[in-house]
Amino acid sequence: HAATVVSGTGLAQQIHKEVQSDTAKLVAQGNRRPHLSVILVGDDHATASLLGMSSSTIFRPSSVSQEEMLELIDKFNRDRSISGLLVQLPLPEHFSERAICNAVAPEKDVDGFHIVNIGKLCLDQRCMVPATAAAVWEIIRRTGIETVGKNVLVVGRSKNVGMPIAMLLHSDRNHERPGGDATVVMAHRCTPLPRLKELASLADIVIAAAGVPHLITADILKEGAAVIDVGINRMQDPVTGKLCLVGDVDFEAVKEKAGFISPVPGGVGPMAVAMVMKNTVTAAKNAPTY
Ligand code: ADP
């Protein structure tokens, strides 16, 4: 029978409510209102919703120098009215993204990309967890998908997405930053397709984060598997010619075989946005009150 389609939009609304009430509580206790600052370089993107927080978006042209960006980040790091700070990636060629990520104060790093946050993530210490990985984690938790002792296949090994997802799911549930206690395997572009199929057929949970449309097809999956689609591929609809979003999973066929499936759009995407908000409230809670 058909899979339960996990509503990322619905779960994101739960998180929004929690963030909103946490924000209200913080403010009622006399704390500063949590504030998220977003730095965008080049084309503008949509800004996130507020949920009782305040936010600001700073635009810089693609020609902005790394020095100027570092100065801006430093200014924001020292600004106590700013709880969370996020620099939208990717950045133009002339930037070292690592240098930019490491310039953001770790306690304001709501993307979780500072080397200290990544190090803590890998040591199962409490940290800012990258939003997409946190989104996958929350979808699994809130949907009641069991992870302990289960086989998880993470397809994709990027440092921002695949790696942190695998880190959360394989680690110990009793550690400071609890993990999923699953047996995790990572596949990537060097994994031969027959091997990918073999691994997928063993997996209780498949997380698709490869950026390859329709990589995960129904035939390679175990009956009843939970399939979480992290892919965001912009494609032209062959019929209407319109631009549309597709994931890495062949949704229509897979939903007939899987136990759970998260759609694209309306799955991991809205949850990831919600997790940035959650990280901002966490940053505000942890901020010194002097
Ligand atoms: P993201 O940031 O969404 O993870 P990236 O493009 O940075 O996207 O990473 C894509 C990941 O997917 C890489 O780790 C790459 O090795 C993996 N990948 C790409 N193609 C395949 C494939 N055909 N099979 C398995 N993994 C793949």
Image (tube, rainbow, N blue to C red):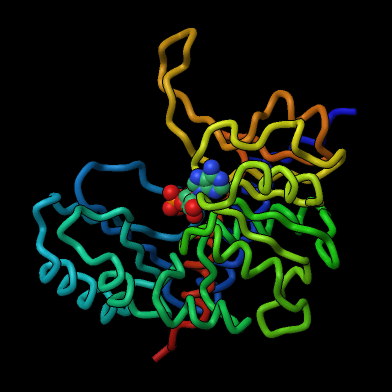
Q: Is residue 149 above or below residue 108?
A: above
Where is residue 282 drawn, in percent x and y? 53, 73
Q: Is residue 270 above or below residue 174?
A: above
Q: Nearer the viewer, residue 185 or 176?
A: 185
Q: Nearer the viewer, residue 174 or 30?
A: 174
- Report the residue that reaches farthest toward the right: 1
Where is residue 182 drawn, in percent x and y? 78, 66
Q: Is residue 276 above or below residue 171?
A: above
Q: Tell me if residue 156 can be seen.
A: yes
Q: Name the residue: 68% across, 40% down.
A: 262
Q: Name the residue: 86% across, 41% down.
A: 224
89 sits to left or right of 182:
left
Q: Tell me if residue 270 can be seen.
A: no
Q: How many marks?
A: 0
82 sits to left or right of 257:
left
Q: Name the residue: 53% across, 30% down.
A: 246
Q: Is residue 119 above or below residue 21?
A: below
29 sits to left or right of 85:
right
- Report the residue that reaches farthest toward the bottom: 290
Where is residue 163 drawn, in percent x and y? 55, 64
User: Which image quarter is the C terminus in?
Assistant: bottom left
User: Which image quarter is the N terminus in?
Assistant: top right
